[in-house]
Amino acid sequence: MEEKRARKRLVLVPVPAQGHISPMMQLAKTLHLKGFSITVAQTKFNYFNPPDDSTDFQFVTIPESLPESDFKNLGPIRFLHKLNKECQVSFKDCLGQLLIQQSHEIACVIYDEFMYFAEAAAKEFNLPNVIFSTTSATAFACRSVFEKLYAENALVPFNEPKEEQNELVPEFHPLRYKDFPVSRWASLESIMEIYRNTVDKRTASSVIINTTSCLENSSLLWLQQRLEIPVYPVGPLHMVASAPTSLLEENKSCIEWLNKRSQNSVIFVSLGSLALMEINEVMETASGLDSSNQHFLWVIRPGSIRESEWIESLPEEFSQMVSDRGYIVKWAPQKEVLAHPAVGGFWSHCGWNSTLESIGEGVPMICKPFSGDQKVNASYLDRVWKIGVQVEGDLDRGAVERAVKRLMVGEEGEKMRKRAVSLKEKLRASVRSGGSSHNSLEEFVNFFKTVKQ
Ligand code: UDP
């Protein structure tokens, strides 16, 4: 009881999207285990309902009056602009109330890098403001390089011929201009406005990143030099503290289906929580998977196919192509699936969580990025860690079949699998006592436990 009263409190502000809520809640659990009390401040969008065993956590709602439809209709970039403007003042009020209510100290505000409105509120109350990056260190650094090149008018325009887009970015090999984290959903100018608010983070107290030095040492060093504030790589957090964070219901029947398959025989296809496909892309993928002769478990999220609720309105051939060797679910227990011995490869959009979860189970990947930082991750999977096959250009059945066969059948795929397993061991070592992420977390925790504010 005495110990509980002495806990310092941390206020955490997640972006309301699955790929950001999950690592933020894993961080919350980790820091709670280290002796802090936790307040999670979230908006009504994608409201994360705390599980029953999280009574130790306080959940508060940041008031705002944006229409419910904005999240879906505006697209992520324009939505984030609006949300940041909207919450600028209301979060100050919210934090002020928390400071009045809390009998014990609030040690700092930790906010997702894209919820940058939280910085002003923290500064107003003289609280340290800590950024939490749920993307890779390389993507973080890349946004900074990209923004600088844009400001200097030195960016290769995205409508330039292909060869120019293939050129390596000076200072930032092995990334090419075409790997820069742009979005399908927004104009370059509005992306840059978000980046301007997130890249130059010397005004923060420190940065926590969900990564580990064995994956991204050079990008982490680059960031440390550039930002001149402490950078703490503490990930992969899903290997440090598991927390139930799914916003959608997981269909566990796929595990029974996997139980009937032999080792490394199944390709898991899942494109995260936001990516959208055209009907023809779905049909080409189905055809390529069918002709690859491999078993496949495919997550098709409701609403993820443009102009279609789910798969009901797809052409008839779709069910013929998937019925022999395929199994389709609306949402899977992804981490459990990747840990299943039957899964030998992961067809992914390369969101950072999916990337870490796949490497964390030693599963090599087929990389078909859609947007933003996914292209950076895909490039690293293919050309730095060499555990992925990147599919570039239009999605056609031939490309799908060739990529699946390269990964699932033959020597090349086997070599990638071995490299992925070796990386998995390195990730595990980094979060164990004495490992780099473990040490980094201890450093962060000790700073806030001992500092007198
Ligand atoms: N996920 C899941 N079940 C699914 C598909 C995805 O639990 O069927 C989870 C996945 O494990 C990951 C998150 O959703 O933690 C997706 O995050 P990621 O960063 O990979 O992509 P985003 O959704 O942000 O594009």
Image: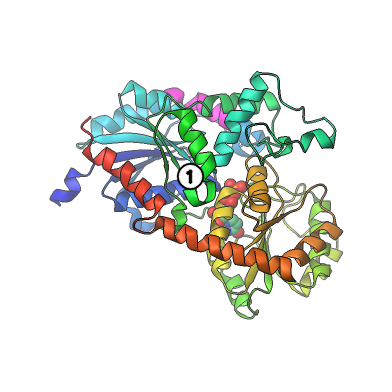
Figure check: 429 above or below 58: below
Of 353 and 254, the residue lying toward us: 353
Q: Determine whether, in the image, residue 220 is placed left or right of residue 192.
A: left
Element on which disc 1 rests = loop
Tell me what residue is drawn at x 35 percent, y 49 percent. Answer: 439
| Region in magenta | 80-89
What residue type is disc 1 on?
Tyr
Q: Position of residue 271 (x, y in %)?
A: 66, 53
Residue 213 appears at what percent x and percent y?
48, 48
Q: Main secondary structure of the magenta part?
A: helix
Residue 325 visible in the picture: yes
Q: Is residue 249 visible?
A: no
Number of numbered callouts drawn:
1
Which quadrant of the figure has residue 69?
top right
Between residues 357 and 284, which one lies in front from this camera angle? 357
Please tell me which residue is depicted at 46% across the width and 34% down the height of the picture. Answer: 224
Task: Kindly identify the residue that appears in the image at 68 percent across and 74 percent down.
Answer: 265
Farthest left residue in view: 2
Which residue position holds label 1? 47
Query: Is the CB of mark 1 within 8 Å of ligand 1?
Result: no
Vertically, is 233 above or below 86? below
Q: How is the image coloured?
A: rainbow
Q: Is residue 84 magenta?
A: yes
**Front one among 61 and 229:** 229
Q: Is residue 394 left or right of residue 378?
A: right
| Magenta-drawn stretch contains 10 | no
Quadrant containing the C terminus is top left
- From the top left corner, tell me how far across and down residue 416 is, in percent: 65, 63
